[in-house]
Image: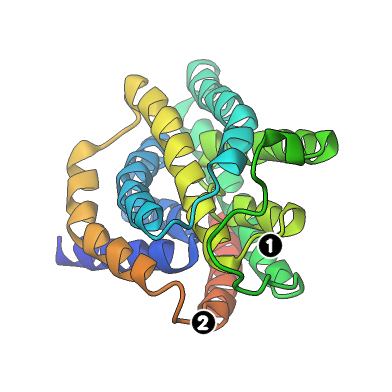
Amino acid sequence: MLETVLFGLLVGFLVGLTGVGGGSLMSPYLLAIGVPAPTAIGTDLIFATITKLFGSASHYRLKSINFQVVLYLALGSVPAGLLGVVTVNWLQTVLPAETVEYYLKTAIGSVVVFVGATLILRFFIPERGERGDTPVWDGFSKMTLKRRTLTVVLGAFAGYLVGLTSIGSGTLIAIILLLLYPLATSVVVGTDIAHATILSLVVGVAHAASGNVNFGLVGTLLIGAVPGVLVGSRLTKVVPGNLLRGILAAMLIFVGTRLVLTA
């Protein structure tokens, strides 16, 4: 139990500090301790919802959330995330449990590697200077149709991966925000976590309704994760996240590759 609590502490800290790393680390860990893949996915999403709720509250107090961007992301990600849940449930009805386990482990491992690669890509995207926490846009009319459409479409892509594997709500959305929006780094993190909270809640509840959640395991993980995410979110403006992201990227590529090869 202590090992699980400490792992929750580590994941919560990384989520609060960088907005990434939650599902990418949690799902492989749950698989490694013998949790079936569908249950690992659902458990991770419920865990993520609660931890990111605390992180969202902290970023709201710091005024580092752009709710306009959150809305457009959710318009694409939430329906697509539910489609991912439908896919998992469909696989369980038409395939033997061993085959489902193989496909889902392979999918999780592949997405983990993809997330690690996007973290490396992030080093090549110029970060915005801290120009205060005020969003760039004063209203919906200031956003172009192209930017809105791209936000919805890319949000849908990330949302489906989250529903299918529980992974990507932080890392992939952060890349989308960095590419599309002139937001300060702290606002990227806050907006990312706020959107991930909504997506994980809806998709996690859908998985729970399908019986894919171990609530006892969620509780154990939260003992460490809640203080971790609160501390991490407080340090976003003073701790450079590049070193952590680099280490995390290498770790994810290794873990994801190993998961695919051993699925």
Q: Residue at x 51, y 26 (%)?
A: 85
In this rendered view, identify the residue nearer to me: 201 or 59: 59
Image: 206 above or below 61:
above
Q: Amino acid at mark 2?
A: Pro
Residue 116 left/right relative to 143: left
On screen, residue 163 above or below 107? above
What residue do we see at 46% from left, 46% from top? 194
Can you tell which of label 2 and label 1 is closer to the viewer?
A: 2
Please give left or right for residue 36 compared with residue 19 in the image: left
Disc 1 marks which amino acid?
Thr
Question: Between residues 177 and 259, which one lies in front from this camera angle?
Answer: 177
Residue 83 x, y percent position in the rendering: 58, 23
The crowding category of the residue bearing disc 2, from other C-alpha atoms within 10 Å (few below 14, some 14 to 19, many at least 20), is: few
Tag 2 secondary structure: loop
Residue 252 seen in render: yes
Q: Position of residue 88 (x, y in %)?
A: 52, 27
Q: Answer with the quarter of the image where residue 182 lies.
A: bottom right
Q: Who's the residue at 64% across and 67% down the image?
A: 119
Residue 160 in sight: no
Q: Name the residue furthest front.
A: 138
Viewer-proximal residue, 108 or 69? 69
Q: CA distance from mark 2 to mark 1?
A: 18 Å
The residue tagged with tag 1: helix, strand or loop? helix
Q: Circle 2 is placed at which residue position? A: 240
Q: Are marks 2 and 1 in contact (CB under 8 Å)?
A: no
Q: Which residue is mark 1?
A: 118
Q: Quadrant of residue 233?
A: bottom left
**Is residue 216 rendered to the left or right of residue 34?**
left
